[in-house]
Amino acid sequence: MTRWLVTGAGGMLGLDLQVTLALAGVDEDDVTALTRDDLDVTDPEAVRDAVRGHDVVVNCAAYTAVDAAESHEGQAFSVNAVGAANVADACRTSGARLVHLSTDYVFAGDADEPYAEDAALVPLSAYGRTKAAGEWAVQARCPQAWIVRTAWLYGAAGPNFVKTMAALAQRHDTLDVVDDQRGQPTWTMDVARAVLRVVDGSAPFGVWHATSQGDTTKYGLTREIFRLLGLDPDRVRPTTSDAFPLPAPRPAYSVLGHDAWRMARLPLLPRWEASLAESIEDVVAEPPTS
Ligand SMILES: NC(=O)c1ccc[n+]([C@@H]2O[C@H](COP(=O)([O-])OP(=O)(O)OC[C@H]3O[C@@H](n4cnc5c(N)ncnc54)[C@H](OP(=O)(O)O)[C@@H]3O)[C@@H](O)[C@H]2O)c1
């Protein structure tokens, strides 16, 4: 019997992780799911108390407002770096294994082939810097840790790109969408299942890339969203990032390699088109809330 603790349990991934644990037959008494109101990861004593008695901790808590982080880097750092360090310290002290979620934004996005798990971290944005600092803190403090990077996440809960594009499709005849940012759209349920595979398969500790197979641009993704919703994909028009200036720079090429899965002979995540097709009805059922 493995006792699980999920931090940031009210977030998009945290919620689907709870669904996945239940679907995998984990007894609800063996899962402690703590939202930000229940546990603030910036409080080291509260984190230590919460972690005690658990075998696996999945740290989904994060400051994820990428643009707001540019002007609130200290706040983002306190959650993404100090919070991660607190969780890592508590896991080391109690002997729990840690799954820490991270992001493609730790990379500059100027590569022309998928980033390996051990590629150098060169974040472009404040959010990316704080997440990179979180990774370093976890690696330095907790030997029994998996750092699971994901990217371009969407799911049934929480605002995300897929929900936003589906909502905009109702209000506009045409949509201009950037065609110069390439990545791997990834469903939260696939990441949650990947987390279970890593833990249950006793995969080697270290860095794992939990992203879909295949890649596309935001424009390509939006065309596929339209197609799956029975809308005309030609209503989506390609543009460049210059047309949508944002506070935080986005990596142009955010494609992560999957060698760790191959080396461990664990199944890779599905292709992005397959997961989008499977999930889109659920994902767009609730409109984006922010
Ligand atoms: N979303 C993406 O596209 C994406 C891409 C790559 C990687 N990731 C990573 O995946 C992980 C999960 O992201 P997500 O999309 O599920 O994000 P999310 O929906 O924003 O969830 C993060 C959760 O953490 C909570 N939180 C914030 N500060 C906290 C604190 N001090 N203590 C405890 N909880 C706190 C948030 O609560 P409030 O909502 O109340 O603030 C929220 O419930 C994160 O590590 C993120 O960096 C996400």
Image: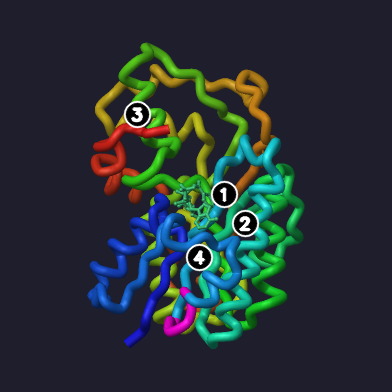
Residue 204: x and y in percent read 56, 81
Q: Which mark is residue 59?
A: 4
Specify which label sits upstream in the sequence, 4 or 2.
4
Real-space Cα separation, disc 3 to disc 2, in angstroms: 30 Å
Q: From the Cβ of disc 4, is ligand 1 less than 8 Å away?
A: yes
- Viewer-nearest of labels 4 and 3? 4
The residue at 60%/74% (across/down) is: 88
**83 within the magenta span:** no
Q: From the Cβ of disc 3, is ligand 1 less than 8 Å away?
A: no
By what rule are the colours in the image chosen?
rainbow
Q: Residues within 10 Å of mark 2 (few under 14, many from 20)?
A: many
Where is mark 2, residue-wise? 80
Question: Does 253 sit above or below residue 106?
Answer: above
Q: From the Cβ of disc 2, is ligand 1 less than 8 Å away?
A: yes
Specify which label sits upstream in the sequence, 3 or 2.
2
Q: From the Cβ of disc 1, is ligand 1 less than 8 Å away?
A: yes
Q: Which mark is residue 239?
A: none
Magenta region, residue range: 50-55
